């Protein structure tokens, strides 16, 4: 008996949304759970060449914690390709500027580096406050220990 894979439109119709409250949690714990949900590796029908992941909503991004001295010692680096144009910013300064960017970079670093990375990151929604605009998706709440 030959089995056929479902169409991409059927897959996206089955996608769920999950809500993660980041208040009092560490960045790494929240980011690993978000990356796991975005890739879809927890699902029974996981297939590596298909994007079967779900959507993730992170709220209270401004109330997150880092462990140890990461606020001052962790550096985010960017380089334009020109000589001498390496820019560094500490985690504390980036967090003051844009708390959601810390989560974007953490989750993006945990996703596989392939063509499916950008569509997966599009399903990641990060909000600074406790309210979000995705109530129509009826997200399931995930508790992180």
Image (cartoon, rainbow, N blue to C red):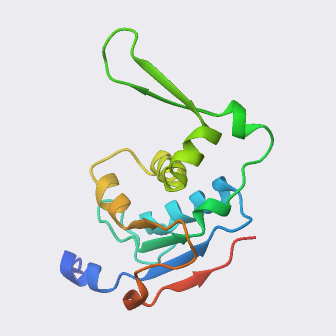
Residue 27 screen position, x and y as percent: 64, 55
Residue nearest the viewer, comparing 128 with 30: 128
In the current view of this chain or complex, which residue is farthest to the top? 83
| Left or right placement of residue 75 versus residue 35 in this view | right
Tell me, yes or no, if residue 7 can be seen here. no
Q: Quarter of the image holding residue 9? A: bottom left
Looking at the image, residue 74 sits to the left or right of residue 108; the answer is right
The answer to whether residue 102 is left or right of residue 49 is right
Of 126 and 31, the residue lying toward us: 126
Q: Position of residue 57 (x, y in %)?
A: 48, 73
Task: Count all numbered tags in the image, as a single digit.
Answer: 0
**Residue with the most extreme right position:** 68
Q: x, y (%) of residue 28?
A: 65, 53
Q: Quadrant of residue 138?
A: bottom left
Residue at 78 percent across and 37 percent down: it is 69
State the residue at coordinates (44%, 80%). Answer: 17
Q: Residue at x 45, y 49 (%)?
A: 108
Q: Nearer the viewer, residue 9 or 45?
A: 9
Nearer to the camera, 49 or 14: 14
Q: Is residue 43 visible?
A: yes
Q: Which quarter of the rendered picture does the C terminus lie within? A: bottom right
Quarter of the image with the N terminus is bottom left
Quarter where residue 74 is shown: top right
Q: Position of residue 16 (x, y in %)?
A: 41, 83
Looking at the image, residue 112 lies above or below residue 10:
above
């Amino acid at each position: 008996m030959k089995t056929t894979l479902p169409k991409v439109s059927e897959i996206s119709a089955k996608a769920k949304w999950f809500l993660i409250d980041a208040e009092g949690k560490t960045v790494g714990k929240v980011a690993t759970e978000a990356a796991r949900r975005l890739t879809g590796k927890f699902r029974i029908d996981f297939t590596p060449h298909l994007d079967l992941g779900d959507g993730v909503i992170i709220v209270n991004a401004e109330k997150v914690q880092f462990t140890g001295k990461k606020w001052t010692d962790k550096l985010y680096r960017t380089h334009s390709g020109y000589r001498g144009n390496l820019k560094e910013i500490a985690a504390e300064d980036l967090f003051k500027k844009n708390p959601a960017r810390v989560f974007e970079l953490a989750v993006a670093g945990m996703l596989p580096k392939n063509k499916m990375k950008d569509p997966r990151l599009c399903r990641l929604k990060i909000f600074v406050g406790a309210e979000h605009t995705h109530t129509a998706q009826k997200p399931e709440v995930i508790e992180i220990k």
